[in-house]
Image: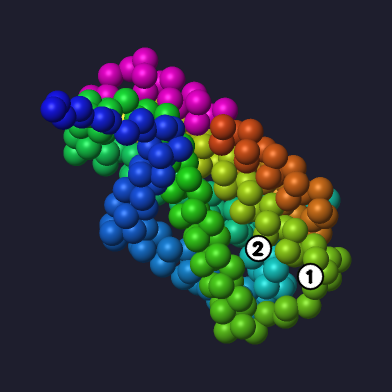
Amino acid sequence: MTNAMTFEHQTFGKRLKTMCKVDFRRMFTQPLVYIMLGISLVMPALILIMTTMTGEGAGESAEMFTNVWQAVSSLSGAGGGMSLTSMCNMNLIYFLAAVLVCVFVADDFRSGYAKNLFTVRAGRADYAFSKSLVGFVCGVGMLVCYFVGAMIGGAIAGLPFAMEGFGVGNLVACLLAKVFLMAVFTSIFLVMSVIAKQRLWLSIVLSLAAGMLLFTMIPMMTPLDATVLHPVLCLAGGALFGAGLGAVSTVILRKTSVV
C-alpha cells in the first residue's frame, strides 16, 4: 500500500485570510499603533483647549474655534483656505495614517520578514491587500479617537455643541465619508511604501507629498453638511482605489527586488 501525500490548494481567499490574521496580530502587538491612537485622542483636545485659551487672552483679533464641530470638518462653501480652523481638524489624521502605514511596511523589509514571506510563497497580492486592510482599520480607529478627543476637548474648553447649518444626519454622513475616504489614502500610502521599501524616510516623504496634493479635496468630499451622496462617492472611490492601487502595489512588488 502506498501513502499518497496530498496538498491542500491554497486559494487567494485563504491566503488573504491567513495574511490578515498575521498582519493584525503584528500590528496590534506593536506600541506604535497605540501611540498613534493616543496622539489622535489627545491632539484635538489640546488644539481646542489651547486655541480657546490663546484666543481669550489675545482678544477678538485672534482666530479661534467658535464651536466644537469645526474641529471635525467645515461646512461646504466655507472656503477651505489655509485658516487655523480649516487646517486643524480631523483631516490631520490622514497624515498620521501615512506615518503608521509607512513604518509598518518599512519594518517588514528592514527586518527581512518580507523577503522570507515572498521566498516561502508568492504572496505579493495578498500581502498588498492585507496591508491596505490593516492600514484602513487602524486609520478608522484614529478617526474615532480623534472624534472622542474633540468632544472631550470641546467640553473642557466650553465650546458650544450647537449644530448651525447642518443636522445629525449630515454629521453622520460626514463621518462616514471620512471613514470611506481613509481607504483611498491608505492605498496611496501603501504604493509609496512598497516603492521605497526599507527606506522609511522616502516612503514618508512620498506619502505626505501625495497626501498634500489631495488635502484640499477632503473638505469638499467630507463637509459637515454632507448628504448621502458624499459617503456613497467616498465608498466608491475607496473601493476603486483600494482594488486598483492594491494591484499596482502587487505589480511593484513582483517587478522589483524585495531587498
Q: Residues within 10 Å of mark 2 (few under 14, many from 20)?
A: many
> At numbered mark 2, what does the secondary structure look like: helix, strand or loop?
loop
Residue 251 in magenta? yes
Q: Nearer the viewer, mark 2 or mark 1?
A: 1
Q: Which residue, as the protein is rendered here, is positioned at the far top?
A: 255
Q: Residue at x 53, y 29 (%)?
A: 245
Q: Which residues are magenta?
A: 244-259
Q: Residue at x 46, y 52 (%)?
A: 96
- Specify the amino acid type for callout 2: Val
Residue 39, above or below 181: below
Position in image of residue 215 (x %, y %): 62, 42
- Specify the amino acid type for callout 1: Val
* Relative depth, front residue between 63 and 216: 216
The part of the image, by quadrant, that contains residue 108 is: top left
User: Is residue 225 something that shows in the picture?
Assistant: yes
Question: Taking 223 as reference, is 211 left or right?
Answer: left
Position in image of residue 258 (x %, y %): 27, 24
Q: Disc number at residue 72? A: 2
Q: Residue at x 81, y 48 (%)?
A: 229
* Relative depth, front residue between 98 and 190: 190
Q: Residue at x 32, y 33 (%)?
A: 8
The part of the image, by quadrant, that contains residue 244 is: top right
Position in image of residue 133 (x %, y %): 48, 45
Q: Specify the color scheme.
A: rainbow
Which of the marked residues, 2 or 1, is nearer the chain's N terminus? 2
> At numbered mark 1, what does the secondary structure look like: helix, strand or loop?
helix
How many numbered markers are drawn? Answer: 2
Q: Which residue is mark 1?
A: 168
Residue 70, above or below 119: below
Question: Taking 89 as reference, is 116 left or right?
Answer: left
